[in-house]
């Protein structure tokens, strides 16, 4: 099987041998009978250590990302936490992309800084900036989020990985916004891929999960141990739902980005919008990089309001008024579901970043474009923009 869509449907999805059921069973057992003391049947003893439903999902995730080993966690942050624990120790240094999710920054800034892990921010598209941020001998990890949350900056995975490897550092890529359908970082030189599977991989706003995919066997052993020792694993039911959702990932992403492109083109022409962030627009600063690195431009669109008085406070007021005036777009956290969502990052996803170098100004609104009819979505945007007049 070579086509992505075929692998998404069939990998780790063999019919049940006992009954012939086309869908593999959901194993809810927390523990497994041992054949004798210390002899585990097919490697299963306790669900924190291994679960057949979770194992099937992990095999599928690794396959779709082009990796060899997949690990499914209880949340995206739990997956990020595992990456930090697997690659760093007190005294080590990390280079973070200068645009990233507020929760990721909080993890480094509020949790791991107190444990002696240092970090600096850098523009990863500027090789000189990246090299200046690296501390030879101390920098062990470079963290890439691309496209970034919420301004959708596209960072060059190949360039960053090449430079990081020169200094003996690993690269980890948060691939949540793209999913493996649109971007496969391991093929571009990255060492670790991390996801919030809550988003596009789950795709229905009904599960919480995270994932890590690697190809290096030594790294895989570290993640396997963290799975066992820390226990932040995905539940069998969340694993089953996520694996089910992978079957439709390709068709969902096609519709997400079809709708997102139409919305971006509409917004960029609207006089009430000061700026539109979408990698598919020719005016996007990294449009050519996105064309090379991604297999499409995704379903996320962000926009900025200048305000009638051309001031930041006025822009913030317009942004909030617009977000609250939308009817079909639901005002909510998260992204990547079949339904369209609107988010005000400054007071929602990035509220913890206020006053930090990655602070998002209040004039920015983020849209997670769903699968609804495009005419209905555009009508909703039009009426909400009218509310700002």
Image (cartoon, rainbow, N blue to C red):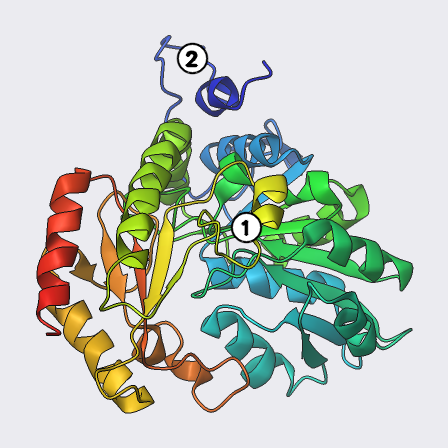
| Rendered location of residue 345, percent (x, y) | 35, 73
- Say which mark, if any, is on residue 298: none
Where residue 12 appears, x then y in whole percent?
51, 23
Tell me what residue is drawn at x 24 percent, y 56 percent. Answer: 341
Mark 2 highlights which residue? 15
Q: Secondary structure at mark 1?
A: helix
> Label 1: few (<14), some or many (≥20) within 10 Å?
some
Query: Could you tell me how far apart the alpha carbons at marks 1 and 2 are, in whole angstroms?
Result: 43 Å
1 or 2: tag closer to the N-terminus: 2
Residue 154 in sight from this viewpoint: yes
Using the image, determine if residue 105 lies above or below residue 237: below
Q: Is residue 111 left or right of residue 387?
A: right
Q: Between 129 and 5, which is closer to the camera in this rendering?
A: 129
Check contact, mark 1 vs mark 2: CB within 8 A: no
Q: Which dot, 1 or 2, sits closer to the camera?
A: 1
Q: Residue at x 75, y 58 (%)?
A: 160
Foreground of the two, 218 or 367: 367
Residue 287 tag number: 1
Q: Residue at x 47, y 22 (%)?
A: 5
The location of residue 290, given as percent across then percent down, is 57, 47
Q: Say which of 120 and 1 sits in front.
A: 120
Left/right placement of residue 66 relative to residue 219 reads left
- The kind of secondary structure element at disc 2 is loop
Q: Residues within 10 Å of mark 2 (few under 14, many from 20)?
A: some
Question: Is residue 237 visible in this depiction of the protein?
Answer: no
Using the image as rendered, state which of residue 188 and residue 231 is in the foreground: 188
For the point 51% across and 30% down, which residue is it? 56
């Amino acid at each position: 099987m070579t086509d992505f869509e075929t692998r998404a449907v069939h990998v780790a999805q063999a019919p049940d041998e006992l009954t012939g059921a086309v869908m593999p069973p959901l194993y809810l057992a927390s523990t497994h009978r041992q054949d004798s003391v210390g002899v585990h049947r097919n490697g299963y003893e306790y669900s924190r250590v291994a679960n057949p439903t979770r194992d099937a999902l992990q095999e599928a995730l690794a396959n779709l990302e082009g990796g060899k080993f997949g690990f499914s966690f209880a949340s995206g942050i739990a997956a990020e936490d595992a990456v930090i624990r697997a690659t760093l120790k007190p005294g080590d240094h990390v280079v973070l992309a200068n645009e990233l999710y507020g929760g990721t920054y909080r993890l480094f800034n509020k949790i791991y800084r107190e444990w002696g892990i240092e970090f600096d921010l850098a523009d990863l598209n500027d090789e000189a900036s990246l090299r200046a941020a690296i501390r030879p001998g101390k920098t062990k990890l470079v963290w890439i989020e691309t496209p970034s949350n919420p301004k959708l900056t596209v960072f060059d995975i190949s360039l960053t990985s090449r430079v990081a490897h020169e200094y003996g550092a690993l690269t980890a890529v948060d691939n949540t916004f793209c999913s493996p359908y649109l971007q496969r970082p391991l093929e571009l030189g990255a060492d670790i891929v991390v996801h919030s599977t809550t988003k596009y991989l789950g795709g229905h706003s009904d599960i919480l999960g995270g994932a890590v995919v690697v190809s290096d066997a030594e790294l895989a052993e570290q993640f396997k141990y963290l799975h066992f020792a820390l226990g932040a694993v995905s539940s069998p039911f969340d694993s089953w739902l996520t694996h089910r959702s992978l079957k439709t990932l390709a068709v969902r992403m096609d519709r997400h980005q079809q709708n997102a492109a139409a919305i971006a083109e509409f917004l960029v022409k609207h006089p009430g919008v000061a700026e539109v962030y979408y990698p598919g627009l020719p005016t996007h600063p990294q449009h050519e990089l996105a064309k090379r690195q991604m297999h499409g431009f995704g379903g996320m669109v962000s926009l900025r309001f200048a305000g009638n008085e051309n001031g930041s406070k006025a822009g913030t007021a317009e942004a909030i008024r617009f977000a609250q005036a939308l009817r079909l777009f639901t005002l909510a956290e998260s992204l990547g579901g079949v339904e369209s969502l609107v988010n005000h990052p400054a007071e929602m996803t990035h509220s913890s970043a206020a006053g930090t170098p990655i602070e998002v100004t209040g004039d920015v609104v983020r849209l997670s474009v769903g699968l609804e009819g495009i005419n209905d979505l555009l009508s909703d945007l039009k009426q909400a923009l009218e509310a700002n007049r």
